[in-house]
Structures are given as C-alpha cells and as structure tokens.
Image (cartoon, rainbow, N blue to C red):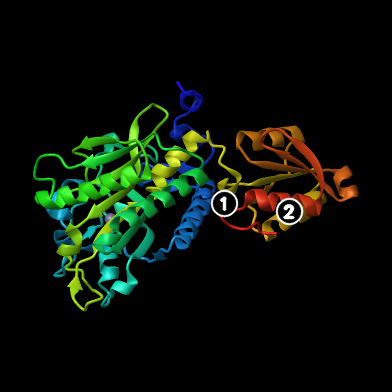
Amino acid sequence: MCPRRALRTVKESVMQDHRKLGRELELFHSDPLVGAGLPIWLPRGAAARRAVEEYLLDLERRHGYQHVYSPPLAKAEMYYRSGHLPHYADDMFPPMVLGDDDAFVLRPSLCPHHAAVFAARGRSYRELPLRIGEIGGQYRAERSGVLGGLSRVRAISLNDGHVFCAEDQVEAEILAALRVMREAHAALGFQPASWRLSLRGEGPKYVDDPPMWARATAVLRGALEAAGVAYVEAEGEAAFYGPKIDIQLRDYAGRESTLATVQVDYFMPARFDLSYVDVDGSRRRPVMVHRSAAGSMERLFAHLIEVHDGAFPAWFAPVQVEVLPVGEASGRAFADECRAIGIRVRDSYSGSLAARIREASLRRVPFVAVLGANELASGSVSLRSRDGSVSSLPVASALALLSAACSSPQRPARR
Ligand SMILES: [Zn+2]
C-alpha cells in the first residue's frame, strides 16, 4: 500500500457523520414541520456556503463562464420536450395545475433553462464555446426513507454549468471542465475516491438511439484517456440522455456517492432545436456538455464537514477569527478592524478566558486573538492558530496575517 493510500484510510476511519457534526457546530438544521430532506442552513453553515459559492463563481469566471439566474420551476411542457417527463418522472414532484393555465413542475434539472439561454437569440460560431453557469435550485422527489442530513435532499442547490460548443471543441471542453474540477477540489481540500465512466443500461429509462450513445461514450472515454486518470466503467449509471464521467466520494461509513460530473449530450440540443450559424453560413447543431465542478452545495458540504472533521480551511470557516478581550474596551476596536477588511469575526466577552478559548477550539475556529492589558499597552495581539501555535504581533501585522490566511485561494489578500 502506498503511503498516500495508507494516510487516506486512516483519515477515513476517523471521519464522523456530518449530521452529528452539523448539529454540534450549528451549521444546518432539519425541522419536521418544514419537512424531511429540506435542511435549513443556519448562519454558520450559510457563511461557509456563501464563501464557497463565491469562490466557485470566481473560479468559473476565470475559466470563461458567464453566469445566469433562472427560475426553479417551469411549464411541464418544457420537461416533456427535454425528455425528463417521459424518462425521469418517477424522480420528479408531480405537476401543479394553476387554473386554466399550463401545469408547472419543480425543475429536476437546470439544463432546459440553460438551453433557453442559448436559444434567447441567434448564435454564431464565433460565440462558441458558450459557457453558461449558475448555482440554482432543482428538486428530486426522494422517498423519506433514503433522506439523511445534507447528503440526500429533496431541494438541491446545484453548482451547474452547460457548455454549448461545436463538435470539434467537445473533447477540449471536457478536459477544461476536468481542470476546473480538480482546481476546485484541491482548493476545498479533498480528493475524489474514484472516477467512473457511467454508461447506459437496459430499459426504457434511456433514450433509444444507439449511435448517439456510442458517439458520446467514445468522446468521454477519449477525454479520460487524455486526462490520464484511472477510472472504472459502470453500466446503468448514465443520465437518460447520455453517458457521463462521475467523480465519486466516500462518506464516513464508506458509502459512495457522485459529486461532480461531466456529460456529453447530443439529445437535448436536437429536442430544443438549438442551432448556430457556422463559418460557411450553414446552420449547425451545437453539442451540450453538462458539467458540475463541485456538485450540489448540500452533498458538497456533507463531504466537507466529514473530511475536515468540521475544521474547514480558514477561507471558508464560518467564523475565521474569534476575538477574546480581557476587559470590554480592548477587543472591540480590533474586531471592528477585522470586520472592515472582510474577515468573519466573532467577539466573545462572557466567561473565563480559558472557557472561551476551549469553546473556540470546539467550534474549530481557525484563529483566536486574545487582547489583554499587556497587549493593549503595547499595541499588540496574541494570536493562536488552530494548530496550537501562539505568537504576539503588532496589530497591523496581525491584521495582514489574518487577511492573507482568510482570503479565498485565487483572490489576492485583502490588505
Ligand atoms: Zn445539465
């Protein structure tokens, strides 16, 4: 066994159930009155999620994505057209009928809305590849027995994206999507358990067009070979419209689930009659590459909570600095200075200093700043990091250090 594998096995064996940690760290809450599979993100969980979402949107912008907003429901007719109602209805909430108007459905995916973005006006080959991204809601009618914490939910917030491109751009776009994914996973501090090429199975669930499946599968296989990653093939795990590359995670109990994915789709562009004007003036059908770099925010955080044991990297920790003054006056100004440069800070005044340090440690806060009479007199701060190291620094140096340590990976330090 290689050392890296041994290390990962040890880490997995001490992973805790994210539901327990999520409760203890006040990250999210499940209320029976709201319903199973509909978790509420509490302020601490929401702060961490917001930081991750902002990072992902920045990352995608750097890789040429343009972001959109689209509503989380649409006319049922759109989902007949997309193939979801014919092939995927068992996983969808039933249509809602509004008076004499059409029936509406909570969307099972964002793909048709993004197809509508492409179709919003005429397109030229010069615009391709057109990369559209959104962190948006989609819904899955899971049975209550399979729901658990954040890992399986009914309301899903997906880091989604669709690339509309020419046939000869598909492989490069898949490879580019895999690069975005790897960059995101490294920044978030985890490695996938495995890579999977998910292929069609038998039955009416899959669109019946063997040449289309063969073409899409060959493109994905070629991209996996070009990316040089080891992967397994799994029949019966494809989307109904096409095969996909799935990035698998393993949870605290050793169960596998899919986080990120890249899919090649020749089906939906035809169903929505998408086209662009090519260099010779002819109309051509784009290919749609569906991809999610970080999956749903729910499943991503289920994994992040477990893999980090709740001790998130400082850039997305809910509280980045806990300011513990000894005496009222000494801490407020420093906490305010931290806030002013965008650091998520909490100042705590009640209880003994030892109890407050212990509390911050239980909350996995990355930095604790202690300000007592000595610090006040010398204009310094005693800074403790989560690894146990302690240093006494002038206030300006402490702010610069914290700013750099708490910034998102690709962003310059705030000061
Ligand atoms: Zn899609």
Foreground of the two, 278 or 362: 278
Quadrant showing the C terminus: bottom right
Expressed as whole percent of the image width and height from the top left, the position of residue 96 reads: 19, 59
N-term mark: 2 or 1: 2
- 312 is higher (above) or lower (below) than 241: above
Residue assigned mark 2? 400
Residue picked out by circle 1 = 409
The x and y percentages for residue 82 are 18, 59
Label 2 CB sits under 8 Å from any ligand 1 atom: no
**Disc 1 element:** loop
Residue 94 as seen in the image, left or right of residue 113: left
181 in relation to 196, above or below: below
- How many other residues sit within 10 Å of disc 2, few (<14), some (14-19) or many (≥20)? some
Residue that appears at 39% across and 34% down: 193
Residue flagged by tag 2: what amino acid is it? Answer: Ala
Where residue 243 sits: x, y (%)?
22, 46
Q: Is residue 87 above or below residue 415?
A: above
Rendered image quadrant of residue 160: bottom left
Ligand 1 appears in which quadrant?
Answer: bottom left
Q: Is residue 216 visible?
A: yes
Q: Is residue 176 above or below residue 253?
A: below
Residue furthest right in the image: 377
The answer to whether the beta carbon of the residue marked 1 is less than 8 Å from any atom of ligand 1 is no
> Residue 60 appears in which quarter of the rendering?
bottom left
Helix, strand or loop at disc 2?
helix
Q: Give the foreground label among 2 and 1.
A: 1
User: x, y percentage for residue 25?
Assistant: 54, 38
Q: At 20% across and 41% down in the image, what residue appears?
A: 199
- The residue positioned 70% from the left and 49% from the top of the image is 402
Q: Nearer the viewer, residue 242 or 39?
A: 242
Q: Is residue 321 left or right of residue 114?
A: right
**Image quadrant for the N terminus?**
top left
